[in-house]
Image: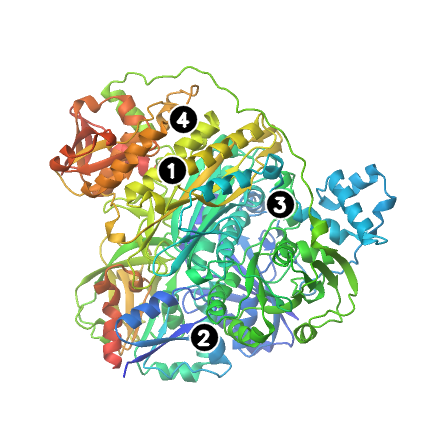
Amino acid sequence: MKPTVNVLYLPGTNCQDETLRAFRDVGAEPRLRFVADVLDGSERLDDADILCVPGGFSFGDHLGGGSVASLLLKTRLADQFNACLTRPLLGICNGFQIALRAGCFGEGVALKVNAAGTFRNEPHARHVVEPGNESPWLTGLSGQTLAFPFAHGEGRFSHLPEATEGWQAALRYADGSELDGSQGGIAGITSADGLAFGLMNHPERAMNDEIRLAFFENGVRAAA
Amino acid sequence: MIHKFSVRTAGAAEPDVERAGRDLGLPDLEIWHDYYIQFATEPGAEGIAAVCDALHGPLGKVTVADVALAEGEVQVAYRRGVVDNESDSLVAMCAALGLDAVAGKMATSYKSSSPKLAEIIRATRFNQTIEELHETEPRYETLMPSGHYEPARYYDLTKLSDDELAELGKAEGRNLSLAQMRHIRGIQEQLGAESVTDVLFEALDARWSDHCAHTTWKSLGSLLGRLVAASKDTQNPNILSMFHDNAGVWDFYDDHAIAVKAETHNGPSAISAYFGQLTKLGGVLRDILGTGLVADPIGSFEYTALGVPETPAPIAGRPAPKQIASDTIRAIKEYGNTFGVPMTYSHMTFHPAYRAKPFALGGSIGIMPTSAAQPGQPQPGDLVVLIGGLTGNEGMHGASASSAGSTMDVTSVQIGAPLEQVKFRKALVDLRDAGCLRALTDVGGAGLNSAVGEIGDPGGVWINTALVPLKTSALPMWRILLSESQERMLLAIPPAQYAEASRILKRHQVRTTAIGRFTDTGRYTVFHQPALAEADVLERAEPGEFGELGFDVPYELLDFDIPRVETGPVPAISTPAPSWPSMAVDEIGKLLEQVVADAEVASQHYADSQYDSTVQGNTFYGPQYGDQHRVSTGYWAGTPVDGSRAAAVLSTAFNPWLFDVHPVDALRQMFVDVVAGQVLAGVALNDICLTDNFYTPHLAENWQEWLVGMVDELAALVRHFGVPVISGKDSSAGSTATDEGVVSVPPAVFLTALGKAPDAAGLTPEQWTGAGSVLALIGPRTPSPVATVAGRLLGISEGPLDAVDLSTVDAYLAALASSRGSFRSATRIGPGGVAAGLVKGALASGLGVELNPEAAQAELLFAEHRAGALVELDEAALAALPEALNSVVLGRLVDETGVRVAGTELLTPAVADRWSGSFTARIS
């Protein structure tokens, strides 16, 4: 039986196709979950092995990246969302912002406006997988450098000095690839238990299949 | 009750605020986002605290409630009823918190100790066309949009004199001629009606505008027909749809087709560059969605020509070129990135002829199943369904005013809201795949009038404007019909499919309203009947009592014959051909430093690095390349079909300085440039199609002759090469009355080429591969310094353009196609000529080139050979090159980066710095 993946589709989501493709290509069974259907009760968020929140500009990012969507997850959809936290969860770009604001990585962490003050696009940003992070999403990738697209405006990872409990570094920018000014060069984090993985950049867009699918393969294997 | 919530970053300013403070000379600048929310029931202290908590986010924000604007603070907000895109999100946020909000509004407040704060903000951060500036707290009775209904006005035209008819035709901002008003009088007589309404005037003003009816092109002798005939003559089997839909459609691989379209928003961009540029991209993306039975956009492109950044606007109160430049980048970034379509090409040109009205071109390509390539045809009884954004008092007379080149007013500007369009983009694909759509079109220029009027022609259609969801509480019927509010689509849905369509649209959270029915009456009918509810429209095909009737007219009466305008031959220009000066190597080096700083050559990475080029995961190549520095590619390639390596290849050609000199000869050079570029990339000649975007000055001398000459030349080139034009737009309002007199753009046409290749892996790379390779120049030569970057810098402005012999080009293209596989890399010769190509090649790859000593000539290095290329190959391949490639060896690649000739380094640190920094320095 193929592991199932719910890919959350919000008003303004725009990276769902490449995300669905990546999960399909590693043998999972992904399906879009429209937030409207979840809110009206006709579908559920927590009836899959993995929850993925893809990239885009949910609700236009009008009140801050991921703000309105994360509020929905924390309020009207709290029960279902909390159930998803017991399984692998992937948040990419806007999905990372949503997951972070929804509390997946504890308190005292934030994704702020890039240091350049604007959106930056770099198709070949290089990321080093953090040694020592044993998240199932990173299995076998420790210390590897992976190049995939950087495309965001609010991805400067910041944390309060005391906020070190709820998250672990998962990816750091290789020299020359850090365009958002993230604290410690952090490009992605996992939750303390490693189940939730959030990153601002887009492995699902890479043209090299090995890189494109590495994280997805791991996540699906962990859920199988 | 209305509460205000103000948010800013705590502590040190965020980088964007810090940057704004630096730019404005206000080091202590604070920027606050003010959110006004109107609640149906009082939220109480707990509710207010919850909103504050939700707005200030997880870290480092300050949020305060109900703090009024203090003395010395300045707030900028959109004008009432224009737009508040954040309103829906504020309401959604409150709903998540269990609070009952009904409307929201956003504003931006600025705080600084500087006494000049208001003056600075007014000059730099405020657009009076669409915004209002407050120095004291504004008082809002309600945030619900306000407005009022005005009944239609009735006129008995049979009792009016010609003078009165003429005056009525121009009243209220209309542009109807006396002949057109007489035609309307004829309609009244044929209908046997006692009167006609201003709704009919407005509908026909838009319908007969140049924007909608292409009157200028028709008056000059069916210019579009000439291009269509030439394209048909090519008998190219890839043509699936050409000039009879919202975009052209080109056959692709794997049972798919690609729609391509580009259009301009020149007039609105002159008034509000931000919204003009925002909606140019939104509009063309909607065109793609509305092609056939839905194409899904897979790539955007944009080009903007504007005045020299260091100069003021020639009309007081209008944005200066520098402001247009920064607003353009912000708009393209915000619409394109939000919409989720990769940017394939962007470029900004600075040319004084565009200082009054920029050339704001936006384009897109989209993928669709071949089975959906043809436009649908509504059937009698089908529902007229409006989806997307609300209709507001904006974009009024946008089509007719921009067509006439007249001064546009506040409501001529359309307001973009990309979120609305993102929502219906995938919904439309789902509707198509579920078989719910009979036909569709976008709602763009001339609003519902154009969309309903065109899609209902010739079968018949009626709509009830009272059902159109409004931003304001009410609007007069003609404004509902003409509003160019963005992000709307019009669908023809069979009643039997409406339930499924509604389900799909609802899950995508797309506003959906059935506003009428298609008929078999052959009549176009518009009325305002509040008593006719949407449920009634869904239940019955007949409208019943019209209520207030705007018009009910047979389509056959709406055609207006355009008088033919005779033109003479293309003007003869006889100036002697200038030659390149003899230059020493050090002089060449100094000239190169200036050439690479020109905006046509310099890196525009400051702008293009803000545009998402990889979303959708299908970008195979472009829009930049280079391991060391990012250099713009000569083409873009994407692989849009899942599981297939087949590539769509996109490239463009435009150079206003060439068109300044001789528009017809310039067109020929641009045509061979873009076609040769496609062949160089790896596309077969018969797999290339074009789109054209003409932009001509209607008050300049001989503009009609030049326009006709360009069209005929394009038609001849289409026939000669078998490369059809499948889509195009004409804007003939390129002259603007300004404070310094009439300013006119050059008569010109922008060409976009779309090609296809069976395997992306076979396309030609542009990055130099390694030391030891030979670098050669190939292609027919256009050696004149006229209209080149270096020629302009040397003050060479007079003289003819090089003639381009088509048989030479034929032989070259055939040889290029057969030899291309032997190139390790190849790039088109662009602005700045071979020299600019060498600099960019070295900067991109980190390699260097040792030029042969005889290469140190201005002509060889700076001439811009339009069909030429710079190719990298090995000795064996060099020896095998066909003669028709006209190759000349320039030098060899070496490991050490640089461009050296006769012991002199041309790629000095100053050259590298000026290439990378000049554009940024001029506009930021």
Foreground mark, 4 or 3, reads 3
Cα–Cα gap, marks 4 and 2: 55 Å
SS class, disc 2: strand
The residue under label 4 is B787
The answer to whether the residues at label 4 and label 3 have Cβ atoms under 8 Å apart is: no
The residue under label 1 is B721
**Viewer-side residue, B65 vs B331:** B331
Type of residue at label 4? Ala
Asked whether the residues under marks 3 and 2 belong to the same chain, the reply is: no
- The chain containing the residue under callout 2 comes to A
**Viewer-side residue, B521 vs B300:** B521
SS class, disc 4: loop
- Quarter of the figure with residue B342: bottom left
Asked whether the residues under marks 4 and 3 belong to the same chain, the reply is: yes
On residue A34, which mark appears? 2
Cα–Cα gap, marks 1 and 3: 29 Å
N-terminal of the pair, mark 1 or mark 3, is 3
